[in-house]
Image (spheres, rainbow, N blue to C red):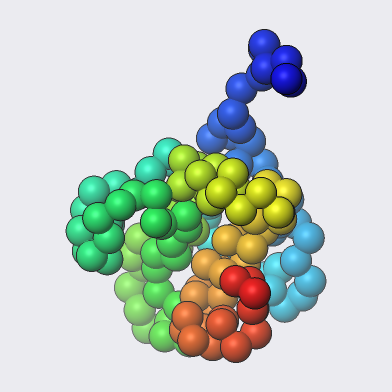
């Protein structure tokens, strides 16, 4: 049996650091597009977000893009809320443990890039054609 004394699950700051590493590894033009998107890490999606998405189990949502996709932005738009990629730590850790076949940094990179793709204006269907993650 492994000695777990003194070990802790990755915290919010750890998840944020891995998301920042994912952002730093992006090639252009994606790196420029990602520069204006904040990353917010919390344990679970807030209840209002879950209700808006029709999700009952907070473990089902690992990440979320909140903002106006670049394909819908206009110079004439009045400034609003900043674009944010939400990362939900408990749900991410739950998926990571359930999978057992992927490193945590790889999973977080996948989630981050998926949500960034929404910022770029891609739909879930567009992303699924390129990213066959579930296979």
Residue 20 visible somewhere in the drawing:
no
x and y percentages locating residue 57 in the rendered image: 30, 52
Task: Look at the image and tell me in which quarter the C terminus lies.
Answer: bottom right
Residue 113 visible somewhere in the drawing:
yes
Q: Is residue 21 above or below residue 6?
A: below
Question: What residue is rendered at 65% in x and 55% in y?
Answer: 107
Question: What residue is rendered at 27% in x and 60% in y?
Answer: 55
Identify the residue at the far top of this view. 5
Q: Is residue 46 left or right of residue 97?
A: left
x and y percentages locating residue 70 in the rendered image: 50, 80
x and y percentages locating residue 13 in the rendered image: 59, 34
Q: Is residue 130 above or below residue 112?
A: below
Asked whether 14 or 93 is in front, the reply is 93
Asked whether 12 or 75 is in front, the reply is 12
Count of numbered marks: 0
Q: Is residue 118 left or right of residue 17?
A: left
Question: What residue is rendered at 79% in x and 71% in y?
Answer: 27
Q: Is residue 37 left or right of residue 31?
A: left
x and y percentages locating residue 2 in the rendered image: 74, 20
Q: Is residue 27 left or right of residue 117?
A: right
Q: Is residue 77 above or below residue 93?
A: below
Q: Quadrant of residue 81?
A: bottom left
Asked whether 5 or 61 is in front, the reply is 5
Task: Look at the image and tell me in which quarter the N terminus lies.
Answer: top right
Q: Quadrant of residue 117?
A: bottom right
Q: Is residue 104 above or below residue 60?
A: above
Asked whether 78 or 19 is in front, the reply is 19
Question: What residue is rendered at 47% in x and 58% in y?
Answer: 63
């Amino acid at each position: 049996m492994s000695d777990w004394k003194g070990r802790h699950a990755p915290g919010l700051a750890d998840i944020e650091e891995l998301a920042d590493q994912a952002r730093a590894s992006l090639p252009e033009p994606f790196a420029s597009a990602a520069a204006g998107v904040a990353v917010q890490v919390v344990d679970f999606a807030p209840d209002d977000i879950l209700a808006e998405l029709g999700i009952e189990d907070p473990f089902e949502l690992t990440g979320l893009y909140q903002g106006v996709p670049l394909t819908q932005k206009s110079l004439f738009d009045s400034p609003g809320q900043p674009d944010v990629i939400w990362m939900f730590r408990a749900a991410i850790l739950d998926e990571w443990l359930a999978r057992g076949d992927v490193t945590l940094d790889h999973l977080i990179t996948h989630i981050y890039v998926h949500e960034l793709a929404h910022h770029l204006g891609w739909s879930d269907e567009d992303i699924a054609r390129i990213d066959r993650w579930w296979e």
